[in-house]
Structures are given as C-alpha cells and as structure tokens.
Image (spheres, rainbow, N blue to C red):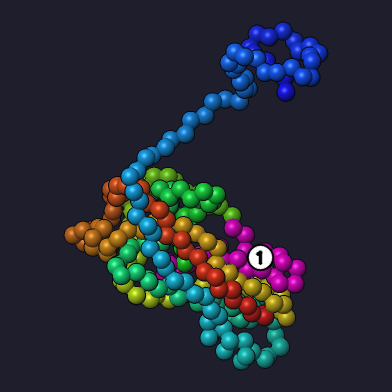
Amino acid sequence: MHWRARGDPPESPRNPTELPPTEPQRLISGRPLCSRKFVVVSEMARPPKLSISLSLAEEAHAREEGSGSGRSSRADFEALSPTIQITITNENDRPITLKTSGGQHHLLVPGEVPNPRARVTAKRPDVQNFSVIDYENQEELIINAPTFISPVAGGSGRGWQRKQFLTLEPQERVTRTVRIPGQRLVSGKEYHVSLRRTGCWWAEGTLEDLFSDGNAILKTWPAGQTLPVSLESKDIVVFRY
C-alpha cells in the first residue's frame, strides 16, 4: 500500500518493502462530507407482541365451489378473487394503540422502505402489505412499490386524525380481510400468499389516553423515541385459482 500526503509529488516507483511513514498522514477523500444525527437515550420501551394469523376466507371457498357456468367474464374473475382473512390479537396485559395508516416517518427501521399505506391493522388493509407468489415460476404478482407523501402532519399541518389509530385491549382480537386482485391470476395455478413485515408506531393506553377529552385530531406528536411494533406472520396461505 502506498502512503501519500497532501502536496506530495507525483507517485514514483518505490520499494515494495517500504514501511508506512512514522508521522501521521491525512486520508484524502474526494467525497463530500456528510453529517449524521444521533440521539442518546437511557432506555426504550420494548414494543408489544401482536399475534397475526392468515387464512383463506370461507366465502372464497363457497364461491369457487359454486361456480360452474363455464363463463370467464371479468365480473366472474372478480367474484372468484380469493379473500385473505387476517386475525390480529393483542397478546399483552395492557391496552395498546397502533397507528394504522398515514406516514410513519417518525419510525426509523433499518432497510425499511417508507410506507404510508394502510397496515393490516386498518379496517381496509392495502393489498401491497402482501406478497403473492406464482408457485410455478416464483413470480411476484404484488409489487411493493414505495409511496411518497408529505412529511407534514396530515399533509397540511392539521394533525393526525383519530381514525388513523386503533386501540386493542388485552387479548382483544380483530379480524380484517383483503381481496387478492384476480387480473393476473391464471386458472389452475397455485399461489402462495404471505404478509410482508412492516413496522408500526404504537403507544401504551387507549385512544382516550392519547387524544384526551374526545378530540378528533392529534395536533402534537407524543415525545420520546419508540421502537416499532413488528407486523409479521409466519403463515403462508396456499390456494389454487
């Protein structure tokens, strides 16, 4: 390795056994300097554990078994599109409130693409929370493309709406459903559906604790650092279209 200091003459042949100089040298870099902000905290609350299970909704089975007209119009395919049922359980001994939709820019999860779409905890989850794989050729049918939103609260500075949050009491269970688009599904093929791991903001307590006095808008974000709740499931739903 050749050692050079600023102002050295052009490099000339040197003895390959030459040792590094005894005086400190400066590393010269052509890249611009960049800054990083770090926050030191004494402790951070451990995020609660949610149990999330996936299954094929019973109505999808009934519609598939009852179809025998032989027609394949667009309406028929839409009616036969599989519906995934998501069951979410709060396995903790305290109530927790989750942010189900909107920007989650206050959570910094390494490697996570910013994703303001409705989580699986929302009343109408976004289908892009899921991965749908064509088992035959391992092709991904649902693209996890990032969505960009305004970094300002509520998009215009008004705050965060109450409907963007969900409170789960201890051991409370909620059920959500999402329909897999049938446009790219091929009759007779096998598909595997799984939940993409996503981070979600949370707080201890109920909506009343968070918003207080029945307010519909949260204008001031709670202080402090929060590790995200991990919305993930080991379940894989397999169906044949």
Question: Mark 1: which secondary structure?
Answer: loop
On screen, residue 128 versus residue 69, left or right, reads: left
Q: Residues within 10 Å of mark 1 (few under 14, many from 20)?
A: some
Quadrant where the image shows the C terminus: bottom right
Three-letter amino acid code at the position of disc 1: Leu
User: x, y percentage for residue 203?
Assistant: 32, 58
Number of numbered discs overlaid on the protein picture: 1
When the figure is inspected, residue 98 is found, relative to residue 114, above or below; the finding is below
Q: Which contiguous range is marked in magenta?
A: 121-144
Quadrant where the image shows the N terminus: top right
User: x, y percentage for residue 134?
Assistant: 70, 70
Which of the 4 quarters of the picture holds residue 121? Answer: bottom left
User: x, y percentage for residue 79?
Assistant: 59, 80
Which residue is at 66% across, 74% downward? 191
User: x, y percentage for residue 149?
Assistant: 47, 48
> Label 1: which residue?
141
Which residue is at 62% across, 59% downward? 143
On screen, residue 72 versus residue 228, left or right, reads: right
